[in-house]
Image (cartoon, grey):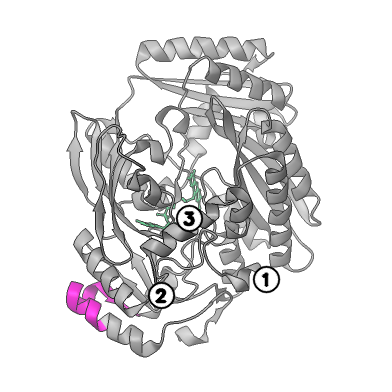
Amino acid sequence: MAESIRTTLQEGRVEQETIDRYAEAVAGLIGTENVSSKYIDLMSTCRDYWPVNSIWMLEGAVPALPQLVVWPRTTDEVSRVLALAHEYKIPVVPYGEGSGALGGVIPLEGGVMLDLKRMNRIRNLDRENLLVTVECGLNGALYEEQLNREGYTGGHFPQSLRCSTVGGWLACRAAGQFSTRYGKIEDMAASVEAVLADGTIFRGRSVPRTSTGPRVDHLLIGSEGTLGVITAATLRIWPLPEKRHLASYTFEKTEDGLEAIRLFMRAGTRPAVVRLYDAQETGNHFPELGDQRSALILLIEGNAKIVDAEAEIIAGYASEQGAEDTGPEHVEHWLETRFNISAASRLLQKGAVLDTIEVTTNWHNAHSTYLAMQKALKGVEGTMLASGHWSHVYPDGAALYLTVVGFPAEDKIAYYKQLWEGAMAACLSEGGAISHHHGIGLHRGRWMAEEHGAGLEVLARVKAALDPHGIMNPGKLGLGEVSKWEK
Ligand SMILES: Cc1cc2nc3c(=O)[nH]c(=O)nc-3n(C[C@H](O)[C@H](O)[C@H](O)COP(=O)(O)OP(=O)(O)OC[C@H]3O[C@@H](n4cnc5c(N)ncnc54)[C@H](O)[C@@H]3O)c2cc1C
C-alpha cells in the first residue's frame, strides 16, 4: 500500500535489501518491538506542521516516506542504531512530535525515522542548583506538569507545548511565550547529551559557564538533527513564582508601543510575556478593544517585590507613550486561549493557504521590517490577511511574527512560494534575521546563504567532518541538495 501513495518531494530511497538487513540487525540489538516498517508507522512520522504538508495531505499525497521507524529507549540504543546506520550509509531523521513548522522531519531520502518518544524520563532533579536532567522525547506539557508538582517551572511555553518534545526544542532553538524573563531554550540549557552520526556519545558539563574553548553543546543546539541526536539535556529551572501581575495597554500607533517596550527593557525590567499586536491582530484577538489601536499585553511574575516594582516602571513608560490602561482581563483571555489553533484547521479545510513567519529585528528596524514584509505579503494576489505582532523582546530588539492567509485562484504551492520569496527578501533587505525561533527545516534552507554568508560554508564543513556519509537528516538547514522543492 505504501507504494500507492504519491510522494511529492522524495529525493531518493535506500535499496530495500539494505534496509531489510539493517532492520534485522537493529531488531537484534534493541528488540523487534522497537522497529517497524508498517505503513501506519511510516505515515505517522513522515511529516510535520509545515503548511505545505497539509496542502498535499488534503490532496492525498505526502512529501516523502521513510522505510523504517525505530524507537530507541536509551542513549546507548541510539548510539548502536546510529553506528549501524553509519556503517550501512542509511539516512536517519530524528523525530520528536512533528510540530516543526518548516518540513524539518521530511525523510527526503527515505531511510530511518528515529522516533524518540520512548526516551521520556526525568533523570534527575537537582533542587540545590535548580537543574533538571531530562530525556529528549519527553512531551513539553508533561515536562512542565512534572516540574510543577515538585514546586518548579521550566519557564518554556511554546504555543506547541502540548505537541512538542524537549529534544525538538533544543534541536530547533525554540522560544517560549514567557521567554523575556526565562530566556530561550539555549539560555536554559546548562548542557546537552548527544549521539553523533557514527554512534559517538557526547556529554556536556552542567556548570554555569566555562572558558574552555567553543562549547560543543552550543553547536548541537539548533542543529535540527543534521549533526546528531540530542538524547538528553540538563536544563535550568525556577521555583514557581510567588506573584503574577497581568496588565494591558493600548496605543494609538504601534510605534508608540514599540518605543514603550524598548524603554522598559532598557531600564532593566524583564516581564515574562510581552506581546504587542498591530491594529488588525488587536481586533482579531481582542474584539472588545476594536481594530484601530495597538494592544500590548504583559505578564510579570517572580518575587512579589520585584514584580510590583517592574509593574510600576512599565506603567510609567507606557503612560509616557500615551497608552490607555485596559486592565488585566485581556491577558486572562490570552492565557486561556494561547494554545488554541483550531481556526487554522478550519481555514485549511476551506481551501486557504496560511502560514506564520517569524523573524528577528533590532529596535531601529522593528517597524520598518514589519511594514516591508506586510507589503510583500499583501502584494501577492490572493492574500486576504497579513497581520503581525512583536514578542520575545530584548534590550536590543524583538521577534516579529507575521500571519498570512490567502485564497489563491490557482496553484497553492506557487502562491505559497511567492509569499515567502517576498517576505524573506523584505526581511533581509531591512537587516532582519530570517528566523527567530521556528528554525530552517527544509523550506527556509534556500535563504541560509544570504543569512550566514561565509558562515554557511563553516557549518557545511562541520557537518562534513561529523557526518562524513551525510546520513543525519539530509537536505535540511540549507546544507544539502533539495532539488524537488527548490525548483
Ligand atoms: C501550532 C504551533 C505552534 C508553535 N509555536 C512555537 C513557539 O511558540 N515557539 C517555538 O520555538 N516553536 C514553535 N513551534 C514550532 C515547533 O513546535 C518547534 O520547532 C518545536 O521545537 C519542535 O519540536 P518537536 O519535538 O515537535 O520536533 P520535530 O518537529 O519532531 O522535529 C523538528 C526538527 O528537530 C529535529 N529533532 C527533533 N528531535 C530531535 C532530537 N532529540 N535530536 C536532534 N534533532 C531532533 C528533527 O529532525 C527536525 O529537524 C510551533 C509549531 C506549531 C505547529
- Indicate left or right for 223 with 20 as reference: right
398 left or right of 148 in image: right
2 vs 3, front mark: 3
- The alpha-carbon separation of the residues under discs 1 and 3 comes to 24 Å
| Labelled disc at residue 459 | 3
Under circle 3, the secondary element is helix
422 on left or right of 250: right
> What residue is rendered at 42% in x and 57% in y?
462
How many neighbours does mark 1 have within 10 angstroms: few (below 14), some (14-19), or many (20 or more)?
few
- How many marks on residues? 3
Question: Is residue 51 shown in magenta?
Answer: no
Say which mark, if any, is on residue 487.
Answer: 1
> Is 31 inside the magenta-drawn segment?
yes
Q: Amino acid at mark 3?
A: Leu
In percent of width and height, residue 128 lies at 18, 28
Foreground label between 1 and 3: 3
